[in-house]
Amino acid sequence: MPAPIGAAIDGASAPRLSAYRRSGADLPFSSPERWHGVAMEGYFWRFTDVAAGRSVIVLHGVNRPSAASTEAWSTIGVASWPDGGLITGAWPGAQARVHQLGARNGSIFCGTDQRVTVDLEDRVHIDVAISQHQRWPSRLLGGSSVFQMVPALNQYWHPWLLGGRADGVVEIDGTRYELDGAQAYGEKNWGRGGFPDSWWWGQAHGFTEPGASIAFAGGDVSAGPFRTEVTGLVARLPDGTVMRLGNPGISPVRADVGHETWELCGRSARWQIDVHAAAPLGDAHVLPVPLPTERRNTAGAIEHLGGHLEVTVRQGRTEVWSGVTDLAGLEHGGLDRVAAELRRRGAPAGATDHRPMVRRS
């Protein structure tokens, strides 16, 4: 059972290490999956049912109004594609596991690396077991790579589960379906101030080879006067090989993201990864992001659950794998960008989420 949010982060650790982790940073060989105690700690699961052409996301943010607060609140959301299901909101109370991955809020939400359950106001019932984990392979550094060691960044990212099996039931507003051997993905993101001013993200299963996956996250990263734009790009090949590009100077990733397109190219001395993705703007869900100190959500992310993505991986000049999927998750975030999209859709003032304008069967 997850420990309360107010529990000590590392009871046996020196105070200096605890304070360092509370800044959001992680030392090499430490686990980014554990709780940090920053303003926002987000937990995210994505399930891709290739046979049914369906995808489901579940998110839970553990939000702290202040560094001294032991009373957290939750941002919870579930969404599905292609039916356009969407339920989000803010709930009082939240707990996080201190020494392992996991978060919960009473009886309405519990998510770990083994199981995710959600019960919201008779509108959502989710109970999904996760097995056959294909976890992040490196113990040295997580998804943020060397940036994980920089204290007080506005955002960190760690895709802890690159693949796995999902089995269970999903019911959203009366639409019910079974997941039987769906593909599973999980990640965490956390930071001192919630979310960057602008960001982009993507994750994809649904390739011909079920062991293959892609994940990327980028945006404006800052800590005090330090500010830069960075994108991390991760590929898991069908044979289980995992590579992570995105360290400036060593393995930079160039990202060109528009309203409906995501173009990425990452290179290192050994690898090159090219990603071309697209999705119609009207197909997107609008999702909330938390404003931790204000104890409320605001619309912040344009999220596609069924985008088109093509990827090619080369070792030197030799192509070692390429894949195509139409079940990619693709996101473009930023408060101003999302406010403009809600106005375009004619959403009511103050809306924090919105279903796709076009629903597909």
Image (cartoon, rainbow, N blue to C red):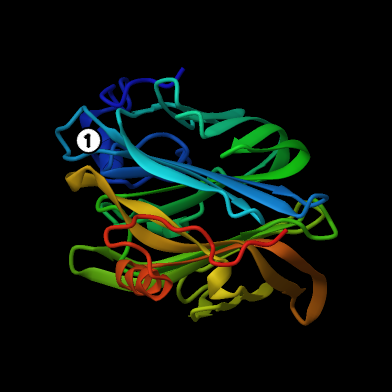
Query: In this rendering, would 20 be left or right of 97?
Result: left
| Residue 272 seen from this side | yes
| Residue 160 rendering spot, x and y as whole percentages | 56, 44
Mark 1 element type: helix
In terms of depth relative to the viewer, which is nearer, 255 or 116?
Answer: 116
Label 1 CA crowd tier, 10 Å (few <14, some 14–19, many 20+): few
Q: Identify residue for label 1.
A: 16
Type of amino acid under label 1: Arg
| Residue 342 rendering spot, x and y as whole percentages | 38, 68
Picture layout, residue 250 above or below residue 93: below
Picture layout, residue 3 above or below residue 40: above
In terms of depth relative to the viewer, which is nearer, 209 or 223?
Answer: 209
| Image quadrant in which the C terminus is located | bottom right
Residue drawn at point x = 54 percent, y = 62 percent: 356
Residue drawn at point x = 40 percent, y = 76 percent: 344
| Residue 179 rendering spot, x and y as whole percentages | 74, 37
Query: In this rendering, would 148 be left or right of 324?
Result: left
